[in-house]
Image (tube, rainbow, N blue to C red):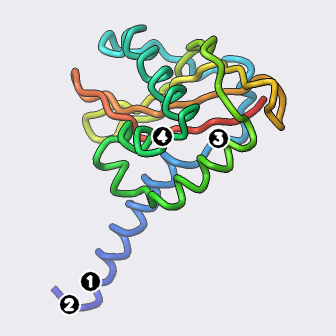
Amino acid sequence: MSTFQRWVIVLLLANLAATVYFGLTQPDSSSDFSEQSDKTAELPVVVSGVVRDRWFNQFREAFNREDFDAVYDMFSPAAQARIDKADMYSELRRLKKAFYQLKPDGAYSHSEFVKNLGDAQVYTLFYNVSFSERSEFGSSGTLKITIAVQGDRLQVLGIHLMSN
């Protein structure tokens, strides 16, 4: 194999990795998150209400305590490998300052199928959330948790919190 062919393969692999990374981590700004979209999907049985509630409460409690290590620990090892901890902590501090606290009345709204990733299916879970009265950006928002489901194995790939 020539040097040129090796470089082409390296560039193709880098492009594939970037496509997967940015496809999973960039928010879809074309959607109105206050309404369910056409991509609403039924979740596999393994993603039960108990599991969905546990993820919401785990994030809410860690966010409210400013326990950003606990938020980081929610992510799968593959997702953690892509995350710059310092950047994540900085972003969480900024969100904490802006929203102050998440109230416990958050509720799962719906899910969207994102794509197949090998033999895993990727979904985004949507939660309607309420912020503290001290929030700088209103009283309500959306928490999105992106997950991968591979049989009975679940992994958190991304978390995105925003105001409505």
Q: Is mark 2 on a helix, strand or loop?
A: loop
Write down the residue under mark 3.
28
Q: Does residue 43 appear to the left or right of 56 in the view shown? A: left
* Residue at horizontal 28 percent and vertical 47 percent from the top: 77
Residue 37: numbered disc: none
Q: Distance between the residues labelled 2 and 1?
A: 5 Å
Q: What element carries label 3?
A: loop
Residue projecting furthest to the bottom: 3
Write down the residue under mark 4.
67
Indicate the amino acid at tag 1. Gln
Q: How far apart are marks 4 and 2 (CA)?
A: 50 Å
Question: Given contact means CB atoms under 8 Å apart, are the residues at marks 2 and 3 in contact?
Answer: no
Mark 4 or 2: the one toward you: 4
10 Å crowding of disc 4: few (<14), some (14-19), many (20+): some
Write down the residue under mark 1.
5
Indicate the amino acid at tag 3. Asp
Residue 87 image-quadrant placement: bottom right
Question: Given contact means CB atoms under 8 Å apart, are the residues at marks 2 and 1 in contact?
Answer: yes
